[in-house]
Image (cartoon, helix red, strand yellow):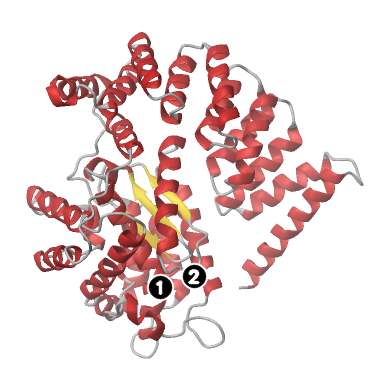
């Protein structure tokens, strides 16, 4: 993907994040005071946990319909690993998070009610270290753990309340229409309420900074990554002049805030944490993805390698190998990948990337053997299993691909692209019932329950009465019918 023109108008996803996060404002409260937080939900709260889950569901459906996503299993696998390294240290009531990778080179990350955490690919480009990258994620987990959105809605209940339905409609409309209509839907009659909420945003961010640094330290990462990342953002802000970086439009940043986080970070023990190699491999992979062209990426990584201190840098050599593959210089890509794998036996990223090179050359047997051996050593691994499915689809083995993809959808049911790939594989295998069932689950994730209902009815009609599979389909159809009735009644 090429870099987008920085002068273009704000993306529709930026509007979603603006709405969801700019309204999530509260008075400053430290982590130590969290036991004094107002009670939200239950019998008397304004927003219950279930309502937050519903918000998250609608937001996810909007993202799936309208926001470009990175469908790279290696990048997603890394993001999952770093998030779940941080999660045990975050005071979250709900740890069932939904992760989103937005395909954009801009710096951005977000968290919205219902446990939705998202990252732009551009965050990898701009965070030079894993500690800096993790600091942004910790900050977003802090937003969720402190339930900023729910608490601000509670504050506004008596003065200038925003209706939950209006908020959801605005978020969804912003994503679907790719325009400012969503903001207008909310702000049209309640502009003063929105303005009042925005006035609190700095103290809200300071609270998330404090909690986020606690999360980093507790997870064995370096809180100093947070002020370092803020300084990177401030430099970008100065370079871009009036074109505010996307992240800063929803996370106001001042010199005082940077200084405050720097001072707080210095209060933690000075235990410098080494980055994991995987972060830098993923970062190199995305640098190629966002380069103007594969040739530009090759020139960039060759220039890096020309430096004497970079000769043994595996992340740079890996980036060059990926760039060679993207430019279809498969022989050079394979040679470099094999050298990296020889020096790092069993490294999954190198194994998968080598298999991708072999797949690009239609060397299906070689790619399959490599991935099957890797899977035997790493049962259930997402990138390996996904690559095996891709190999089988390319080689025309729909049934084998469907087996791999069914396993993945059981473990990652919220990944909508897996259901689409499963439907394709089932079609190749001439399993029409399987196609309908996979398409139904895809439609559910996209928020189109009526289409999902139609798909399941077609599956039901093709199954013999009394069969176990028909019973499963009928039960799922009943669940969706109940959800549709509840939606229409509400």
Badge 1 is on which residue?
147
Q: Quadrant of the C terminus?
A: bottom right
Q: Relative to residue 383, is residue 123 drawn left or right?
A: left
Q: Relative to residue 30, is residue 111 drawn left or right?
A: right
Evaluate if marks 1 and 2 touch, with contact meaning CB atoms under 8 Å apart: yes
Badge 1 marks a residue whose secondary structure is loop
Badge 2 is on which residue?
93
Say if residue 181 shows up in the picture: no
Local crowd size for mark 2, using a 10 Å CA cut-off: few (<14), some (14–19), many (≥20): few
Height in image: 149 above or below 249? below
Near-viewer residue (20 or 163)? 20
Q: Relative to residue 187, is residue 84 drawn left or right?
A: right
Badge 2 marks a residue whose secondary structure is loop
How far across and down, in percent of the image, does residue 431 sit?
A: 74, 30
Height in image: 476 above or below 165? above
Q: Relative to residue 474, is residue 366 drawn left or right?
A: left
- Going from N to C along the chain, the mark reached first, 1 or 2, is 2
Q: Quadrant of the N terminus?
A: top left
How far across and down, in percent of the image, does residue 189 sit?
A: 33, 77
Quadrant for residue 489, please give it.
bottom right
Question: Gap in Å between the C-alphas at discs 1 and 2?
Answer: 9 Å
Q: Report the mark closest to the observer, 1 or 2.
A: 2
Near-viewer residue (420 or 294)? 294
Which residue: 85% across, 40% down?
A: 463
Which residue: 43% across, 35% down?
A: 74
How far across and down, in percent of the image, does residue 390 sit?
A: 55, 25
Query: What count of labels does the image hold?
Result: 2
Quadrant for residue 160, please give it.
bottom left
How far across and down, in percent of the image, does residue 157 sit?
A: 40, 86
Local crowd size for mark 1, using a 10 Å CA cut-off: few (<14), some (14–19), many (≥20): many
Height in image: 109 above or below 286? below
Which residue: 41% across, 25% down?
A: 350
């Amino acid at each position: 993907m090429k870099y987008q023109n920085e002068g273009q108008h704000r993306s529709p996803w930026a509007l979603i994040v603006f709405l969801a996060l700019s309204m999530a404002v509260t008075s400053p409260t430290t982590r130590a005071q969290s036991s004094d937080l107002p009670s939200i939900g239950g019998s008397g709260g304004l927003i219950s946990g279930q309502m937050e889950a519903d918000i998250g569901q609608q937001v996810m459906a909007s993202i799936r319909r309208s926001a470009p996503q990175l469908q790279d299993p290696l990048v997603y696998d890394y993001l999952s690993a770093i998030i779940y390294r941080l999660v045990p240290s975050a005071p979250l009531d709900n740890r069932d998070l939904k992760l989103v990778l937005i395909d954009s080179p801009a710096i951005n990350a977000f968290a919205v009610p219902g446990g939705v955490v998202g990252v732009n690919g551009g965050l990898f480009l701009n965070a030079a270290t894993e500690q800096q990258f993790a600091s942004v994620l910790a900050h977003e987990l802090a937003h969720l753990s402190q339930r900023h959105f729910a608490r601000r809605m509670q504050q506004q209940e008596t003065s200038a309340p925003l209706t939950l339905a209006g908020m959801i409609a605005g978020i969804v409309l912003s994503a679907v229409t790719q325009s400012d209509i969503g903001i207008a839907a909310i702000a049209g009659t309640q502009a003063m309420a929105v303005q009042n909420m925005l006035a609190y945003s700095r103290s809200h961010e300071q609270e998330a900074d404090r909690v986020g640094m606690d999360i980093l330290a507790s997870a064995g990462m370096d809180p100093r990554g947070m002020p370092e990342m803020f300084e990177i953002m401030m430099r970008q802000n100065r370079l871009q002049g009036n074109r505010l970086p996307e992240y800063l439009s929803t996370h106001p940043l001042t010199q005082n805030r940077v200084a405050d986080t720097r001072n707080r970070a210095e209060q933690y023990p000075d235990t410098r944490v080494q980055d994991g190699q995987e972060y830098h491999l993923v970062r190199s992979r995305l640098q190629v993805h966002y380069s103007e062209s594969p040739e530009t990426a090759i020139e960039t990584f060759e220039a890096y390698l020309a430096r004497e201190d970079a000769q043994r840098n595996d992340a740079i050599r890996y980036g060059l190998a990926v760039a060679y593959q993207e430019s279809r210089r498969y022989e050079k890509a394979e040679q470099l990948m094999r050298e990296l794998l020889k020096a790092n036996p069993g490294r999954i990223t190198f194994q998968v990337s080598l298999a991708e090179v072999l797949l690009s050359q239609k060397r299906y047997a070689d790619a399959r053997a490599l991935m099957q051996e890797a899977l035997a050593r790493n049962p259930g691994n997402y990138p390996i299993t996904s690559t095996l499915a891709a190999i089988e689809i390319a080689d025309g083995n729909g049934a084998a691909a469907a087996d791999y993809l069914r396993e993945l959808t059981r473990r990652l049911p919220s990944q909508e692209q897996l259901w689409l790939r499963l439907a394709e594989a089932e079609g190749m295998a001439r399993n029409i019932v399987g196609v309908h069932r996979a398409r139904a689950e895809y439609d559910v994730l996209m928020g189109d329950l009526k289409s999902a209902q139609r798909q399941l009815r077609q599956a039901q009609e093709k199954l013999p009465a009394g069969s176990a599979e028909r019973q499963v389909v009928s039960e799922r159809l009943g669940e969706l019918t109940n959800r549709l009735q509840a939606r229409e009644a509400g």
